[in-house]
Image (cartoon, rainbow, N blue to C red):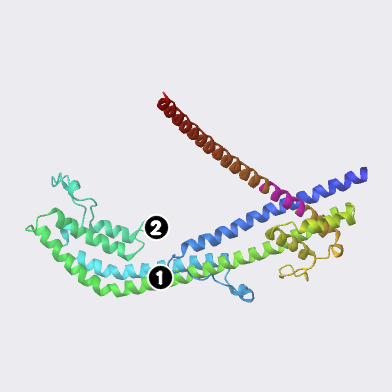
Amino acid sequence: MEGTAAKVEDFKGRVDVLITKVDKLEQRVNEVEKFYLTTEKKQPSTSRKAPILIDKNKEKHVPSMKKLQQDASRREAAAAKRMQELMRQFGTIFRQITQHKWAWPFMQPVDVEGLGLHDYYQIIDRPMDFSTIKNQMEAKDGTGYKHIREICADVRLVFKNAMKYNDEKSDVHDMAKTLLEKFEEKWLQFLPKVMEEEKRQEGEEAEARLNMQLTQETVHTKLARDINNELYDVDMHIEELREMIVKRCRRISIMEKRRLGIDLTKLCPEDLSKALDIVAQNNPSFPSTAENVELDINAQSESTLWRLKFFVKDALKAEHKSSSKDDDDNITNKNAAISQDNDTASKRKKEICDAVAKVAKRRNKKLG
């Protein structure tokens, strides 16, 4: 008894280990599935791209996630440095505009209180001036401009605010309009350099996104491969446990084999196909999908016979329940039909009786 109890405990322990392993595998499968679902959603539905297939021999050439992050940091630093150089060059244009003889009204923030412009903030949403722009351009604490187009937008805002608040006939409006035209001419000459840098950054970012996708594909492909290998190990352990149980079971008798052979012929086509698959699992050469199959019950292993026995028992039980339900439905329908026929017959009988009574009544009247 003690030996049997120890074996049972050992068996339970091995089953618990398998359950824990399967739970962890399920989490990893969900992670892989989530990744591919997310990737699929990001692709336009009108033009779905084929998944990236990664050659196993080329996996080592795909950059790691750590390297991608390092490359991204270097790329961003280099792009920021180039943008700083562009802003430095733009400083020449900015100085030419601020040194113009008509630039003085725009050099400092508008003195709203001193000039009594009580409606200024009702008309102007975002005040701007050259001194504010200059301070932003020279900021060293990371709060300054990140892109040259931000400076351009603020320079335009200086003039547009002045033109919006001041009447068209006023000197300030005319000065702002003239300086804005001069600025646009100089900006148009400088713009090709800006567009070239933007195009370069777009290309680098596109390449980085592709590398990131390749890396993620590689990581999840390897993860899926590892999961597949671990699932194979789980299957092997389950098979070992199954064989362990079968060895402790009694051998199936000749009468049980005959009964099993008869019961197999009672299965529906779908369940019969599943039963043949069970046979094929322990016998890879067995033609389970052939049109005509000969199954020698006596040639099957004890493991296969026990699995077939339990499967056939459950399948026939399920078919019996389904058949019983159909029979009950048929009986109910027949009873309803009989009841309806009885009602019709009774109604017809009453009609005939009423007709006979009427005829007898008329005859009695005539006789009287």
User: Vertically, is 283 above or below 266?
Assistant: below
| Horizontal side of residue 328 vs 316, given as left or right | left
**Whole-percent x and y of residue 133?**
27, 59
Q: Residue at x 92, y 43 (%)?
A: 2
Say which amino acid is labelled 2: Gly
**Whole-percent x and y of residue 128?**
23, 55
Q: Nearer the viewer, residue 286 or 93?
A: 286
User: Vertically, is 320 above or below 38?
Assistant: above
Q: Residue at x 78, y 69 (%)?
A: 286
- Quadrant into which the C terminus falls: top left
Cβ–Cβ below 8 Å for labels 2 and 1?
Answer: no
Q: Nearer the viewer, residue 71 or 361?
A: 361
**Whole-percent x and y of residue 81?**
40, 68
Does residue 101 show up? no
Q: Earlier in the sequence, mark 2 or mark 1?
A: 2
Does residue 255 show up? yes
Q: Residue at x 29, y 69 (%)?
A: 90
Residue that mark 2 sits on:
142
* Residue 297, disc: none
Q: In the image, is residue 315 part of the stretch drawn in magenta?
A: yes
Say which amino acid is labelled 1: Glu
Q: Secondary structure at mark 2?
A: loop
Read off the magenta span: 312-322
Furthest residue in direction left, as rendered: 169
Indicate the quadrant where residue 219 lies: bottom right
Furthest residue in direction front, as rendered: 367
Q: In the image, is residue 296 part of the stretch drawn in magenta?
A: no
Q: Secondary structure at mark 1?
A: helix
Residue that mark 1 sits on:
202
